[in-house]
Amino acid sequence: MKGVPGLLRAAATGELPAWACVDARRRRHSQGVARLLGEWADALSLPVPEGERWRAAAWLHDALRLAPPAELLPLVGPGFRELPGGMLHGPAAAARLRADGVTDDGLLLAIEYHTIGHPDFDELGRALYAADFLEPGRTFDPLGRAALRARMPAARAEVVAEIARRRIGHLLRTGRCIRPETIAFWNALVGHAGA
Ligand SMILES: [Fe+2]
Ligand SMILES: [Fe+2]
């Protein structure tokens, strides 16, 4: 396990960096995601520092959720500038963390792509993608999401693929653009990477 910088250790307990921009509702959401990831890390008997890493990513993933897009745009790389304003917070938070000295590439990718999905996600990246969708405070389809939560983390490969299917389905139904990373993520989940 890479050393966990103080910032990540603090985040694992719910202490966000000074640059975070959240309200009480967003804090509750991040707390719910952290609780899920903590439960899953325990159920998987992950080492304590890895559980801490998972909880830190959960607390940090939406740390800039309420920052104005105009403030986030200058933080993100050119590859993200076309994202809808509401999706800039992941890449922007990852950029902030990188600037703060965080070097854990798996954690940074998990946060950067938590709304998009990425074929190079490690276990944490996939778990964060799932927990963000399954967090109990969300109001849509509570029964369907509870059923998926109950299968975590044992059936995580199937559950993450099901969540990706629903999210990509929503993009298709609403006529949205689908990023190549999302398609590559899907292909990786169903075992056809590069096919
Ligand atoms: Fe988010
Ligand atoms: Fe979130």
Image (spheres, grey):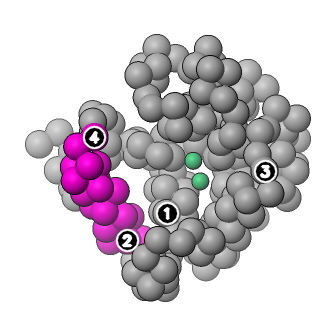
The magenta stretch is 156-176
Question: Which secondary structure class fits the magenta region best?
Answer: helix
Q: Which amino acid does label 3 sit on?
A: Asp
Q: Looking at the image, do the residues carrying marks 1 and 2 touch, with CB atoms under 8 Å apart? A: no
Left or right of 71 on screen, residue 85: left
* Of the image marks 4 and 1, the number of the one nearer the N terminus: 1
Question: Which image quadrant is residue 107 in?
Answer: top right
Would you call the spot at circle 4 few (<14 residues within 10 Å), some (14-19), or many (20 or more)? few
47 or 9, nearer to the observer:
9
Q: Is residue 60 visible?
A: yes
Q: Mark 4 points at which residue?
A: 176
Cα gap from disc 4 to disc 1, whole angstroms = 19 Å
* Of the image marks 4 and 3, the number of the one nearer the N terminus: 3
Report helix, strand or loop for mark 4. loop
Q: Mark 1 points at which residue?
A: 133
Q: For the C terminus, give its image quadrant.
A: top left
Q: Which amino acid does label 4 sit on?
A: Arg
Q: Mark 2 points at which residue?
A: 159
* Residue positioned 79% across, 38% down in the render: 20
Cα gap from disc 4 to disc 2, whole angstroms = 23 Å
* Of the image marks 4 and 2, the number of the one nearer the N terminus: 2
Q: Is residue 163 magenta?
A: yes
